[in-house]
Amino acid sequence: MDDPEFSMGNPMSTGKNRPKSNIPNSPKKMESIRKGQPSNRINTSNAPPPPPRVASNSPTRYNRVDDETKDTADTVVDDERPQKPRKIRGEKSMDIVELNQLSSTEGPTRGPSQKLDRQKSQNPSKSGNVSKENVEKIKSTKSDEEPGRKFRGKNIIQYGLWAHYMGYGCSLMCVTLGFFACLWTTAHTWGGGKCTVNGTPINSIYIPDPTTGQCLATYNGHQVCCDANSESSLVGNIPVGVIYVLYGLFIIPYENITWGYGLWFPTDSFFYRNRISPIGIFHILVSIIGFTNYATALAAACLLTNGGIYAYAAYRFEGGDGGRVQSKKAYEQKLAAKQKAIQDGTAPTFSENISNSINHVLQWNPIAFYKRIYNEDKLSSYFWVFIFILGNALLFIVTLLTWFGILTAVRNGLLDGDLDIFCKSRLCHANRKMVRYGPVSIMAAWAKACGNCLNMDSSLILLPVIRNLLRKLNNSGVSFSNARSQTDYFAKFFSRPLTRYVPLQKNIEFHKMCALAILIFGYFHMFFHFINLVTANIATLTLFRFARWDPTDWLTGAFVTYAMFIIYTAAPDAVRHAKYEIFFRSHHMFIVFFLMMFLHGPVFIYWSLLPVGLYLLERYLQLYRGNRPYLVNKVEWIPPVMAIYFRPVFKEDFVFKEGQYLYLNCPYISQTEWHPFTISSAYDDLHNGPRIHLETGEEVVEVPRPSNLPHGAKWNKFCLASKDWRNMSPNDYLDKSETGFMDYVSIHVKAHGLDEPYARTWTRKLKEYFELLSPGGKFPFYFYRRDQRGEIQIGRQYGPDGKQPIIRVDGPHSAPSEHYTNYGTVMLIGAGIGLTPCASVLCALTKYRWKKNFNPEILHFYWIVRQNEVDSFQWLVHMLTDLSFEMKRGQETGQIEKRYYCEINIYVTGVEKAAKEVRPLYRPKKENVNFGNVTPAFTADELYALMLNPTVESKGQVKKMKNSDSPNRLQDIWIWNGRPYWDEIFKELKDQRQHSDIGVCFCGAPVIGADLRTMCEKYSNAEDDCLFSLHKENF
């Protein structure tokens, strides 16, 4: 076993001469990063900080102006998968002296000796001498004086956005419960003060004698008689009900973004400067009125919560206009296009639209529809949607008819005098209550039908988010063509039905479908019960009670509804993108939801036993996986992306496929905060990593054996990849003992909030934590430790205290892109943050799989990137350069067969007219890449320069690519100016296809995913023996 890890100044020194580490073992010394305090330290990395962001005068919808300021971790790949936020509170910052003391101590890392020129940040919060108060003062002045800053608060709209959606929920609750507050003033038991059912008197044994007040029906010596003069326990209030109905109707136009005041947070108002939310105050005041009545108490709780969230948004100085400027421009463009179409005579008239719609309905052919969805490989999706709807419909009808029979039997029992009242069961107790206060109304049957569907959907909603289950099912997948190629009928349809006929990549859509069903059935379950309570509240509460307490269902139902209110109002994508912590933390109200569901209806346990059991198993496995030991090898920083290289201590603990993702946790920042990141390395990198210099951590290459070396003489010499061995003295070569293999798994993390005075985001806190662990605070960091023999070993597991791991990993988990191996031809598409799975697949194919003659044979990689984001992807520029050389060398040396082909198209969008300055890349240039007779076709600097200033338009791409002398071509990489034209790309691939089944793996913006889905449907046709199968990442 290794000794506890430590830091050292000279990595080659012995244990006795090791300098003492100055990194504090006490958490107090590094508390500032963990708690998100102002970062007044001077940036000491060897890479310049990102330039300050330029304020835009037209914020995007919901005022998500600066994506970097959102308090959520984000990778270059995904934002949508479920993340686990932390519990961190901001405090005052440590001063710059304390930070410098921490960053200058001897740590577990070393950086190379090279120093790159530093750029001074224009952000005053990073000067190192500006206090928190001055930073806030400067920011406030800028917000007030800079043109176009009227709607730019100190924070973008985040909690205000949540409160906006809460407003619509409150509107529904106020109108509904306000209506019942008025209706409950007419609540009664036996209709009209008479013991009758539908106008017919009940049996005489239940009717008391007018003189004695006694009846013939008794139980344990107590009279069971009809009490025609009893009063309902429900108490309505017409004034409160009217106020709530009107206030609920008022909220709808108020929250409207187009012509109301929804998301209207100007920063030049009295309310903004004094942190006051007028609508929040109104909500709180109206909620006080609602708590005075039983019917409106739940709506009052929702209003109180909404008002509190609005008040907190005002306290945070959130500002924005709700995207009105952009919406207005979009509307004007749409109106102008419509008017132009009318002038040109191409716009259809109203009657033509109606006629076309009618003809479309009348001409619908189910056989043709079936053929179309089969050709598009969408049959499984439609099938399971149909099964889901059919299952809910059948369950609803069966439950409704069953309860109709039960309620009819109760009424007949009252009329015939044979109602069972002589047992101790809950049903007999309810029967006795119905004899006294009247039978349950027919609305109870409708409520129970909705409730039973609610039970089923609440159980199903867990299945799509159980990651371990999804991984098991995904790993058994086959492609469409492989399934069709089976000759045996049984093997063709039943060998692997789970992934062939279950659209696992639609798990989030199914989760949302279940949520929608829960919302609908939950609302009407409450609505019908509230109507039923008007005529039979005592009998109803008794019949459906739990634990011998009549109001059980009322109270538990209120908690269920409130939990749904919190979850659903924070579930929209706009809230999730604005601040993921709101989305995630509010979703944890599902714990309250399920606990109350168990109490609300005990039958729910039978529905949810399996899903809840699987979910609890998933959480246990997550805890188990998260405690496995991992070593951090290297951390690299190319603003604003941080690459983390690590490996498991036991490699069999982390067996993954390219395209999968993992969850990362830094215990020093938070024990409970986990964030998803897609793996950017190939699986074989974990077993065939590069050889590095143990002292500096830099990659090394083997020096060729000299021709004049005597036969039999040993030769194992290496040199740094950044140096040319030809210009070095043999004495400067490295011995084999001075090097080692760095096997790794890598992820690339985009750090957010770099220009904020506080380290608020998890990614920035992680970056600064790594900086404090390094001796000089310079990237890249190489982590190491010494074993019991004093030998240097690559990687470090524990932090400065020797007890707490630096990182924890939960994974791997399945993702759609992992199915690329099932196809002969693959279209690999990445856009924006959805690039990392593409990098993993590229590495796997060009470095390993094609040398072993594995599928796919043809790879088309399409990368869409904005010009102002090219700097963020310098790591990929280096990777594409290395992989292109690896591909060229492999084919020229015969390691890769000629049938394998990789085509890369890079689309640079948002290109400015003025040429951009090309600066040197951060990573040092590799000198030793031309061993033998194979030389690189281009360098990373050439690719980077061409990407910064693309010259060839992407329109007409297919024709231009046939020109061998195209100026935008580097080996098999084409760089285009503009977005891809998918229509001509798909048409060319279909015409030139060598395989009938083409996999389309995509991770990126939803709008591009929608275009790809349209293209896949357009060009897929089983009759033409061509099918494009889309595997889209959800984030």
Image (cartoon, rainbow, N blue to C red):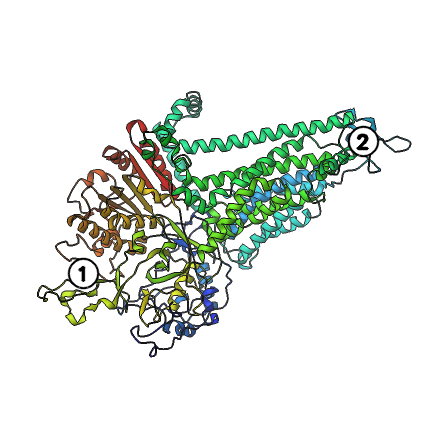
Name the foreground residue: 155 vs 116: 116
In the image, what residue occupies the spot 73% across and 35% down?
536
Element at label 1: loop
Name the foreground residue: 943 vs 816: 816
10 Å neighbourhood of mark 2: few (<14), some, or many (≥20)?
Answer: few
Residue 234 in the image, given as x and y percentages of width and height: 74, 40
Residue 920 in the image, given as x and y percentages of width and height: 24, 61
Please tell me which of labels 2 and 1 falls first in the chain.
Answer: 2
Q: Amino acid at mark 1?
A: Asn
Which-is-in-front pick, marks 2 and 1?
Answer: 1
Residue 940: name its quadrant: bottom left
Name the residue tied to disc 1: 928
Residue 949 in sight from this viewpoint: no
In the image, what residue occupies the spot 55% across and 30% down?
393
In the image, what residue occupies the spot 57% across and 55% down?
311
Element at label 2: helix
Residue 994 in the image, given as x and y percentages of width and height: 23, 35
Q: Amino acid at mark 2?
A: Gly
Q: Residue furthest right?
A: 211
Q: Residue furthest bottom?
A: 17
Name the foreground residue: 1019 vs 135: 1019
Residue 481 located left or right of residue 79: left
| Residue 193, numbered label | 2
